[in-house]
Image (spheres, helix red, strand yellow):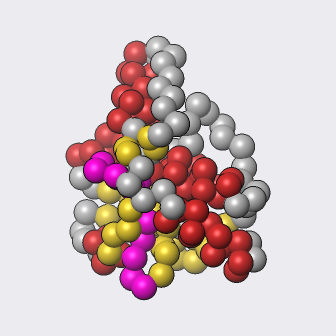
Amino acid sequence: IIVVRSQTLIGRIIRWVTKSWASHIAVYIGEGLVFEAKPGGAGAKELLAYQTKNYSYRIFRLDVPSEQKEKFINALIQKTGEGYDYGKIVSLAVNRLFHFDMKADNSRLAICSEIVYTAAQEVGIPVPPISGKYITPGDFLSWSIATEITS
């Protein structure tokens, strides 16, 4: 699991809205590719895209059996094309700016952290409960089922 800190404007906004070190999350799926939810739809992207000055990241290894990791990756790949949930981002921003409790819930759309969390749940990975309304990229920094291998 790659927890990303983007220095772009959108990355800074996401970090501010989520009160987190991180602004994005992706999962390495092999062959130089990562899977992520992003505007335009969920899918694979070259890992090398993260090797720019705009990103810093922390990499975590899931501490689950390899067959469960494989199922997890397959569950993510099955989500290819899933739409991006701008409503959740707006909901988080409204809550942060105005302290107004608004919840956007569209099961056909997802943000990056949600798509990873949901795929893990689907294959029986013992994910920790969500502390707030939504799972955010920063929530993955404290997963006890993952070991940081680099920062």
Q: Quadrant of residue 92?
A: top left
Residue 33 painted magenta:
yes
Q: Horizontal and vertical percent for residue 43?
A: 38, 62
Between 11 and 30, the residue placed more toward the observer is 30
Quadrant where the N terminus lies?
A: bottom right
Which portion, as a residue range, is magenta?
31-42
Q: Horizontal and vertical percent for residue 91?
A: 42, 26
Q: Residue at x 71, y 72 (%)?
A: 68
**Picture mark count:** 0
Q: Residue at x 75, y 59 (%)?
A: 124
Magenta-colored segment: predominant secondary structure: loop
Between 23 and 48, the residue placed more toward the observer is 48
Figure check: 4 above or below 134:
below
Q: Quadrant of residue 144?
A: bottom right
Between 27 and 136, the residue placed more toward the observer is 27
Residue furthest bottom as drawn: 31
129 relative to 74 in the view: left or right? right
Figure check: 66 above or below 57:
below
